[in-house]
Image (tube, helix red, strand yellow):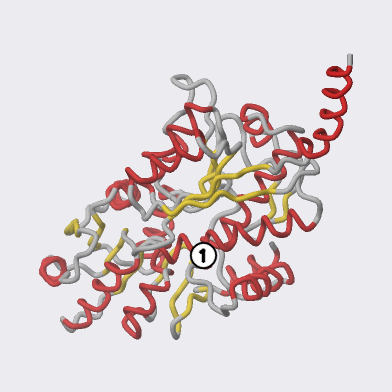
């Protein structure tokens, strides 16, 4: 009898502690290396969201704890980290992932464990389609970034429809991101009966793009459409100027990376790209986010503003889904994400029913990205209509 009473008393003492056990959320991305401007910006955005959520009581009366891992933009490391977050750290969900190759390699483990993952940055069009019905009855992969099918259409619209160029060259890196982006660009061009005059590939770490640029110029290219990341894109921008070739560059959102802008310097001026978020204080909400980022990091500059904003919004959406589910079971969180009826006020946009059972892309339809332009070392709105549209969000 004494033992039973003691056991009951122990349970009563432990119950509050058990009820307040934190909710562990996995966060992975490249926090070092060439992709790190995206990863660090994303991580800071996620941390800001977690701090705000916890300051207002957490979720279901529990604090959010971020379990952070650097995947170094390496596919095999990203896959191992996903397994460790699931097996060792017991995360209930995950946000993050910057590189498309890392996403494709690692998200299969979340899918197998039935743990939702919201991709905050990776844009490869295949990311949310890897585990779709009927082969997979339930898809646990969601996304809060503009997929490359959408971006490629915007890039081609900017270069061909609006600027009038017909002789286009495609420059892409040799990663999954580059190859898939190239394919999306070619499909967008084919819809306009245009075939690129050249398609040039480069590897991560390449510093001399002269041979590819010379071939493109010899083929009569009027514009370069790019799919790569900052360091290599800067070598393209610098290389074309070194050749005395003033050819326009229009590419994916990664042209906004700080290591592109800094390395290309004046050679980055006028480059255009799709952007889900531009760090221009056009609304009270955006001003507030920029101020919180500055306060949290001590820096006026966000290395890649869309990555920070998408990371921030990803955690807000996940927290809303956990509240709606009423628990941290993976299947319940997934179902809540697919029918999220609480309005979530993000900085990229407001979200109301952002996902469905068959569509796990938050950015689509009326919520198309803006066109950014590099001007004096920063990304600004290329069009005043986009600036006005951002102010209304």
Residue at image mark 1? 41
Note whether 59 is above or below 113 in the view shown.
Answer: below
Counting the numbered discs, the total is 1
- Please give the name of the residue rendered at 42% of the width and 73% of the height, measured from the top-left corner: 258
Answer left or right for 304 relative to 161: right
Location of the N terminus by quadrant is top right
Residue 219 visible somewhere in the drawing: yes
- Please give the name of the residue rendered at 70% of the width and 43% of the height, measured from the top-left corner: 22
- Please give the name of the residue rendered at 58% of the width and 68% of the height, measured from the top-left corner: 386
On the image, the x and y values in percent for residue 243 come to 15, 81
Where residue 254 sits, quadrant-wise, is bottom left
Location of the C terminus by quadrant is bottom right
Q: How crowded is mark 1: few (under 14 residues within 10 Å), some or many (20 or more)?
A: many
Foreground residue, 12 or 300?
A: 12
On the image, the x and y values in percent for residue 178 come to 29, 53
Where residue 332 sits, quadrant-wise, is top right
């Amino acid at each position: 009898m004494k033992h039973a009473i003691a056991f009951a008393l122990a349970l009563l003492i432990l119950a509050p502690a058990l009820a307040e056990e934190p909710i562990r959320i996995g966060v992975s991305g490249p926090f070092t290396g060439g992709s790190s401007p995206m990863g660090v910006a994303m991580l800071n955005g996620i941390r800001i969201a977690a701090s705000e959520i916890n300051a207002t009581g957490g979720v279901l009366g529990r604090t959010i704890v971020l379990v952070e891992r650097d995947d170094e933009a390496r596919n095999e490391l990203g896959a191992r980290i996903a397994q460790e977050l699931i097996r060792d750290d017991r995360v209930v969900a995950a946000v993050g992932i910057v590189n498309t190759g890392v996403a494709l390699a690692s998200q299969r483990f979340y899918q197998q464990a039935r743990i939702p993952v919201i991709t905050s940055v990776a844009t490869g069009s295949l990311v949310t389609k890897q585990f779709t019905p009927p082969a997979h009855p339930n898809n646990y992969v969601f996304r809060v970034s503009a997929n490359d099918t959408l971006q490629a259409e915007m890039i081609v619209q900017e270069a061909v429809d609006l600027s009038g160029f017909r002789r286009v060259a495609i420059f892409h890196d040799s990663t999954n991101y580059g190859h898939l982006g190239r394919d999306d660009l070619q499909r967008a061009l084919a819809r306009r009966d245009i075939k690129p005059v050249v398609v040039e590939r480069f590897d991560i770490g390449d510093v001399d793009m002269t041979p590819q640029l010379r071939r493109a110029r010899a083929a009569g290219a009027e514009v370069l459409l790019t799919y790569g990341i900052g360091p290599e894109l800067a070598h393209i921008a610098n290389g074309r100027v070194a050749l005395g070739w003033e050819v326009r560059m229009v590419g994916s959102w990664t042209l906004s990376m700080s290591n592109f802008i800094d390395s290309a310097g004046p050679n980055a001026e006028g480059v255009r790209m799709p952007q889900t978020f531009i760090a221009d204080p056009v609304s009270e909400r955006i001003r507030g986010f920029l101020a919180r980022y500055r306060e949290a990091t001590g820096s006026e500059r966000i290395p890649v503003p869309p990555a920070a904003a998408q990371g921030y919004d990803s955690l807000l959406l996940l927290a809303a889904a956990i509240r709606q589910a009423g628990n941290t079971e993976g299947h319940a969180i997934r179902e809540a994400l697919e029918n999220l009826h609480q309005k979530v006020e993000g900085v990229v946009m407001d979200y109301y029913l952002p996902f469905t059972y068959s569509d796990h892309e938050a950015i689509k339809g009326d919520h198309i990205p803006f066109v950014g332009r590099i001007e004096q070392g920063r990304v600004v709105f290329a069009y005043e209509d986009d600036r006005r549209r951002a102010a209304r969000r």
